[in-house]
Amino acid sequence: MWLVAHAASMPNRVSKFANAAPVTTVIEAWDGDEWEVHVGRLLQDRHGSINLQKVPARHSGDGGLDYYCASEAVVYQCYAVQEPIDVATRASKQKGKITTDIGKLCKVDGVAAKLFKSKPVSRWIIVVPKHDSQEVNNHAATKAEEVRRMGLAHIASNFEILIHDRDDFDEDSWKRRAGLRARLRPVIAPATDQEVADIETSRVDLVDNLRRKLAKRTKAAPDLEDDVDIALRSFIEYQNALDFLRANAPEAHEEIVALTSQRLRRLKLVGAKASESVANILELELDSLTASFRERVANLDPDTAQELAFGVVSEWLMRCPLDFA
């Protein structure tokens, strides 16, 4: 637990989850594109693969719908907020999404107007990972009434707006389709300029260690300062990732911390390979740690594993377990 214990000693290193209520269930974090793909697979199970049509957003926009089933006159919009957030914020964002995309749906010269000339849309469903506020239902009902009053040719007179989340899909379908995802991808808050400045001004000794070691690899002063900035940001983002995993995927968090502690003990005892150049030592440590993370946490996203390794090595450079001859 060495990294966690030392993280608390860093300036202004207060966990974003320190004052949060105890987490009893894992919050699934979804990238918006990833969520859209996952929902598409679930909808294929719901309607049949030949009955579901995707609406690409790249050319001319999606018009407020990602998928539709023409035979049932139902359209779907996928939306995933960046977790973790509180119920009120999640509801506010979902209501905003409904307002924005219903506006697109109602355009008389929009995508929906062209697609549903012969069979008006009867249901518009926003599909979210988590729906937990009746305020969203109330907002949806209000917007649906507004749309019905518009009397649009491509909107049915009994038009409704619904909110679906994972509980609205067949459990077997969800489990089978979730297996295709099979990746843990924590939400990593990017390091801010202020966080970097806080470390530079209040832990000068650590930053000096980092600069001294990186200078053995980078000779030009401007390039050196860029490398120092990258390393500090990697360290901060690694801590942000640990915060997220601790709150949302505790088993993965424990595995990563345990593995890092094991590697740290080995590094302190054995040290880096003296025969290797500075660049090679860094590359070997990064590659080895990335591979170990992926092996220990099998469903960890590969890019995330590499980002975690960058953060760990940056901390080792700052705190002196990793040094060069």
Image (cartoon, rainbow, N blue to C red):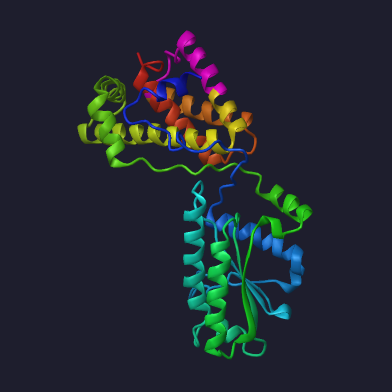
Total labels: the figure holds 0
Q: Which residues are magenta?
A: 258-278
Magenta residue check for 317: no
- Magenta segment main secondary structure: helix
Q: Assign the C terminus to one quadrant of the image.
A: top left
Above or below: residue 323 compared with residue 129? above
**In the depicted structure, whether residue 11 falls above or below residue 26:** above
Q: Nearer the viewer, residue 225 or 315?
A: 315
Horizontal arrangement in the rendering, residue 151 relative to residue 3 (left or right): right
Q: 95 left or right of 7?
A: right
Residue 56 visible, this angle: no
Residue 68 sits in which quadrant?
Answer: bottom right
Q: Residue at x 56, y 90 (%)?
A: 151
Magenta segment: does it hold 259?
yes
Residue 6 found in image quarter: top left
Looking at the image, which residue sits at the far top?
A: 269
Residue at x 48%, y 38% (from the top left corner):
20
Which residue occupies the foreground of this view, 221 or 147? 147
Residue at 28% across, 41% down = 193
Query: As rendered, which of 126 and 237 lies closer to the eye?
Result: 126
**Residue 71 coordinates in the image, percent (x, y):** 73, 80
Residue 23 pos. (x, y %): 57, 38
Say which residue appears at 59% left-offset and 69% top-offset: 66
* Picture coordinates of residue 186, whole percent (x, y): 53, 42
Is residue 104 depicted above or below 317 in this figure?
Answer: below
Q: Is residue 186 above or below residue 217?
A: below
Can residue 200 be spotted in the picture? yes
Q: Position of residue 102 (x, y in %)?
A: 52, 75
Q: In terms of depth relative to the viewer, which is nearer, 28 or 19?
A: 19
> Residue 224 vs residue 298: left or right?
left
